[in-house]
Image (cartoon, helix red, strand yellow):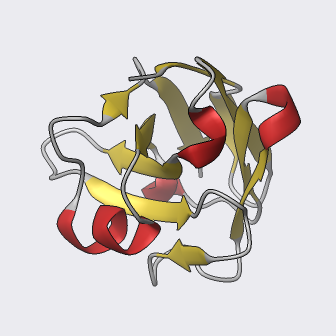
Amino acid sequence: QVQLVESGGGLVQAGGSLRLSCAASGRTFSSYAMAWIRQAPGQEREFVAAINWSGDKTYYADSVKGRFTISRDNAKNTVYLQMNSLKPEDTAVYYCAGDPDTVERLWYLGLDDSGSWGQGTQVTVSS
């Protein structure tokens, strides 16, 4: 497994932007499918975006399409989430997650027992 640490969260006004980063330790990061998942108070976890090991295949939730962009830099063991045109409903704790399986399995079935989670970073969007 890899260890994941998120950063970049904070308070931003509606319409603003934030970039989240997820730094991974472990030599197998480049083979992992990665995802950003968020959870707002009282709500279920929502997969926001996912990316395959090479970065050429991505998935997005309908709620963020056209506003969020997931990317990765395997040389830096880091995955990013660029969030633009933020809305109050984007307020949540954002988690980074990785899985050694395919991005399709990660996106459609979620993490299995070999997957890893970060500790989360809070994003708050004020109206």
Q: Nearest the camera: 122 or 80?
A: 80
Indicate whether 21 appears above or below 85.
Answer: above
Q: Is residue 120 left or right of residue 57?
A: left
Q: Is residue 75 left or right of residue 23?
A: right
Indicate whether 73 appears above or below 103.
Answer: above
Where residue 74 sits, quadrant-wise, is top right
Indicate whether 36 appears above or below 113.
Answer: below
Q: Nearest the camera: 27 or 89?
A: 27
Which residue is at 71% across, 61% downward? 54
Residue 126 visible in the picture = no
Q: Nearest the camera: 40 or 100?
A: 100
Location of the N terminus by quadrant is: top left
Residue 53: x %, y % from top left: 62, 56
Indicate whether 22 appears above or below 40.
Answer: above
Count all numbered tags in the image, as a single digit.
0
Which residue is at 55% across, 35% downward? 123
Residue 40: x %, y % from top left: 29, 44
Which residue is at 18% across, 46% downward? 112
Residue 104 visible in the picture = yes
Residue 14: x %, y % from top left: 68, 55
Residue 94: x %, y % from top left: 46, 38
Q: Is residue 101 left or right of residue 8?
A: left
Which residue is at 16% across, 51% downward? 43
